[in-house]
Amino acid sequence: MWARLAGAAEPQLLLAGPRVRWSLAALAPVGCRMEEPGPGSSAVGDAPPPAKRRRLLAGEEKRPGRGERYVPPPRKRNLGVSFSETHFAETCYYFEGGLRKVQPYHFDFQTYCKGRWVGKSLLHVFSTEFRAQPIDYYRAAASAGRLRLNEQPVRDLGIVLKNNDFLRNTVHRHEPPVTAQPIQILVENDEVVVVDKPSSLPVHPCGRFRHNTVIFILGKEHNLKELHTIHRLDRMTSGVLIFAKTAEVSKRIDEQVRQRQLEKEYVCRVLGEFPENEVTCEEPILVVSYKVGVCRVDPKGKSCKTVFQRLSYNGKTSVVKCFPFTGRTHQIRVHLQFLGYPIVNDPIYNMEAWGPTKGKGGEINKTDEELLRALVEEHRSKQSLSILDISEEDLKPIITPISADSCRTEDSKDQKEAEILACLPNYDTRPETHEANPEGASSSGNQGGLNPEGASSSGNQDGHTEEKDPLCEECKIVRQDPSPRELVMYLHALRYKGAEFEYNSKMPDWALEDWDES
């Protein structure tokens, strides 16, 4: 309400509430008429900054009572998908044994307090939801200044979380190696960038991968930034990958994708003698685990359709063209497994874990949880867990009891997966989330040049310097690198055709009729 205060030259606006009674005069410095600060000016005396003053006037902000911990309001978040030079400069590549490797680097994972964390201590949240590390690790990280709450170091893990609390965790990040095969630019114009993606490269940052991704390599080595993803290929699938340069082009092509107007053609090499006649598979596909990346045919799954045509047969394996009319996760691979002709070197769907027939005809005879355990155990026995983005040292006992006070996931399937994967640090397949960053948390590079306490650098025989971190378990482990051949799966996106374009890549060597399997 407006009122004239004693001695005031003009009416004043009074704000009354349960805890606050302000006037515009009270918000201005003594002896000065209140004005909006101009560019470059700052608040003086007791006057709050303009943004906060506007919130106070609108009644959007209340000051905490005595003894209460103040939580700043949420910051505006950049909803864009692009990465800047600052992100690209977080670390660098080096090449060794036919592999592209990333220098380990410090990195900040960030998240706002989840609703289910409100009223619980940091100690409780870490012990129930972030069990990738023992609680002693988080105590040591707090002591070293690695954990921050609302940008202030947290020393006491007993602090109780409140709504809008902002958490930041500095970790020492290691990325798995990928093939050193370069990304070939097939087409670049004002609208799109089309590349031939090598096998083993994720399209965008996800899980343990950030710099060893197509998006980052294109930005760092080809100066191609702010690209919009049109479609995705599995990490182990190679071939045609399209990016739009503008949001308008992205929307236009994406509409063709949604209307199923894109013609997609893949080629693969499968076990056995594939039928000479055209084969159509329309079995529905269900996701068993998003985290591990496993699907299977199931009546409760999503409808899909793939048409197959045999190109050649060499007495052991067949080269097959695949035409997916839908875009379900692992659609081609799952349909081929169901038909009894899995891709020769498929690290998921050509495994004994599926049973004697390897899942042919949908015959598995295992629950989803038993299947996941069997797949992990088989790869562990073959020392190939890195293919699943799970390392031998990351695995503690597969079954980890869940305590009664543990925070339950939203459905039973996620809870059972949590039991299997509870002790897998650095494990998640969602874009830009990681070991201490579940369900929609964001992440950013350690842009302030922070060198956490105790971190040191050491060189190796190849001349590149490797930073060691005393809190990082990965730094204490010497891993055996995969061979470049292990990073290839015989599935390749050969052609993408839309209403106004057609992009093709050359046939891979392993798909040629005279290819020598040895």
Image: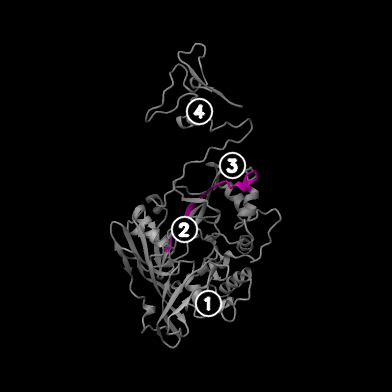
Say if the magenta span includes residue 113. Answer: yes
Secondary element at tag 3: loop
Amino acid type, callout 4:
Leu
Point out residue 437 in the picture as x, y percentages from the top left corner: 54, 53
Rendering coords of residue 73 (x, y %)? 53, 38
Q: Position of residue 288 (x, y in %)?
A: 57, 67
> How many residues crowd mark 3 within 10 Å: few (<14), some (14–19), many (20+)?
some
**Residue where numbered disc 2 is placed:** 104
Using the image, tell me which numbered label, if any, was put on residue 57.
4
At a point 51% along the width and 77% down the height, the residue shown is 337
Q: In the rendered structure, are the residues bearing label 4 and label 1 in contact, judged by CB atoms less than 8 Å apart?
A: no
Frontmost residue, 486 versus 114: 114
**Residue drawn where x is 46% and y is 77% of the image:** 280
Q: Is residue 3 above or below residue 260?
A: above
Name the N-terminal-most of marks 3 and 4: 4
The residue nearer to you, when weighing 213 against 17, is 17
Range covered by the magenta-colored residues = 101-122
Q: Which residue is mark 3?
A: 163
Task: Classify 10 Å Cα crowding around label 2: few (below 14), some (14-19), many (20 and above).
Answer: many
**Label 2 close to label 1 by CB (< 8 Å):** no
Q: Is residue 136 left or right of residue 203?
A: right
Between circles 3 and 2, the one closer to the viewer is 3
Q: Secondary structure at mark 2?
A: loop
Specify which label sits upstream in the sequence, 3 or 1.
3
Q: Residue furthest right?
A: 404
| Disc on the earlier residue, 2 or 1 | 2
Whole-number angstrom distance, CA of label 3 to CA of label 2: 33 Å
Secondary structure beneath disc 4? Answer: helix
Marks 3 and 4: CB-CB under 8 Å? no
Q: Nearer the viewer, mark 3 or mark 1?
A: 1
